[in-house]
Amino acid sequence: MSNSARHRVVIVGGGFGGLKAARALRRAPVEVTLLDRTNHHLFQPLLYQVATGVLSPGQIAPALRSMFRHQPNVRTLLAEVTGIDLERRVVTAAAAEEIELQYDTLIVAAGARHSYFGHPEWAAIAPGIKSLEDAAHVRSRVLGAFELAEQASTDAEREAWLTFVVVGAGPTGVELAGQLAILSRRVLKGEFRRIDATRARIILIDGTSSVLPVFSEPLRERARQDLIALGVDVELEAMAVSIDERGIEIDQHGRRRIEARTVLWAAGVQASPLTELLAAGSGAETDRSGRLLVLPDLTLPGHPEVFAIGDMVSVEGVPGVAPAAIQEGHYVGKVVVARLAGRSSRPFHYLDKGTVATIGRTRAVAEVSILKLAGFPAFLVWAAVHLAYLVGWGNRFEAVARWMWTLVARNRRERLISTQSLADDQVAVAERLAG
């Protein structure tokens, strides 16, 4: 079969779902074009470790081109999708110039973005972590806060700089809060002269009645106790009602304000804007988070040639986690191969392999079927799972080495601060000091 006669597959998104779909087509008689607005695949579950100085960006973000070097039927393009014409079967993208890509099969795995529950103005004040740029920004905000606390002229200002609020007690929020506690109590201990970094206040808030709600009650309580042992203030049934540059107001059986110069967001996500394009073009419905409701084979209603997978879709019984996106990508790739061979396929079935979360150092919880683990055994399971999904043996060895080092040392290598990433008031102080 000549290249010109090959089935054309366009994949939008180089995350877990898109990556797995492309790899599932490695032996298929297809021409794959993989579009992403960055040049790398991002291992999002470990972004918080980049934000807190444990890992470097390159360890969790291998270049897409290097990953498909030995898969000649895949072409990667650095471009951002601006339009999808379902009738003409054309994807429009912005690169050096606007391009149009025709497809026979379209796989959209565009992921999700932060949801601020009707308060988009909070995004600039309370950053979340969804990209490498986000992680670098948060790292600068956090480390910069300690630097500016050292220079504060009043006790009240110093205390505000040393107060960190994490909104959202899901896995990302819990892991981030735990790492912030370790950073202040262990890594930065004794490095400042005017402040005691170990006295930093780490506050984790959530509107629900527990941390890590996807886990069983005993593990949720164990995680809460582990956070408290690390020095994290856990504030539950507390809703964020107002956030500004100087702090946050919460409603916890009555309103109160917390003066905190650093508020970090880990409370919710909403589907990619491409979801709206697909919904408008196909008539597909969306849920409250804007996620597409797809058919059992992950296709759009009336468009069997268009698949949507990952965090941008809602499938009954399937959580919005990396293993689900990986399974969906693998499934879609196999469906495309089966169709080309004239075979039918069964509906997508998600295999729940369990849930893991780490709180800090060797503190973790894991739930795999009826097996429930906490402490060091759960930490080993967490490490094994993340290493299995991390791309590249070099990155795996480096991650293990960094994790082992952080267990025994009181230092982290990734502690660079970019004044360009700091909030406006932090930048002003930095510029005054530089002048």
Image (spheres, rainbow, N blue to C red):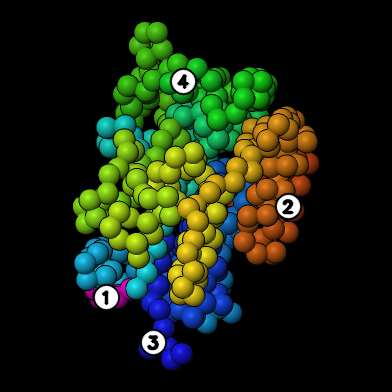
Q: Nearer the viewer, mark 2 or mark 4?
A: 4
In the rendered structure, which disc, 3 or 4, sits on the residue that comes first in sequence? 3
Kind of residue sitting beneath label 1: Ile
Secondary structure of residue under mark 4: loop
Secondary structure of residue under mark 1: strand
Rendered image: mark on residue 400? 2
In the rendered structure, which disc, 1 or 2, sits on the residue that comes first in sequence? 1
Rendered image: mark on residue 99? 1
Rendered image: mark on residue 5? 3
Residue 95, position in %: x, y? Answer: 30, 72
In the rendered structure, which disc, 2 or 3, sits on the residue that comes first in sequence? 3
Residue closest to the eye, 193 or 285:
285
Q: Please report the bounds of the magenta region as a residue range.
A: 96-103
Q: For mark 3, does the 10 Å Cα neighbourhood hold few (<14), some (14 to 19), or many (20 or more) residues?
A: few
Q: For mark 2, does the 10 Å Cα neighbourhood hold few (<14), some (14 to 19), or many (20 or more) residues?
A: some
For image coordinates 26% across by 75% down, the residue present is: 100
For image coordinates 64% across by 43% down, the residue present is: 353
Q: How far apart, in angstroms, are the residues tagged by discs 1 and 4? A: 46 Å
Q: How far apart, in angstroms, are the residues tagged by discs 2 and 3? A: 46 Å
In the rendered structure, which disc, 1 or 4, sits on the residue that comes first in sequence? 1
Secondary structure of residue under mark 2: helix
For image coordinates 68% across by 53% down, the residue present is: 387
In the rendered structure, which disc, 1 or 3, sits on the residue that comes first in sequence? 3
Q: How far apart, in angstroms, are the residues tagged by discs 1 and 2? A: 42 Å
Rendered image: mark on residue 208? 4
Q: Nearer the viewer, mark 1 or mark 2?
A: 1
The answer to the question of whether label 2 and label 3 lie on touching residues, with beta carbons closer than 8 A, is no
The answer to the question of whether label 1 and label 4 lie on touching residues, with beta carbons closer than 8 A, is no
Most extreme residue toward the front, as rendered? Answer: 343
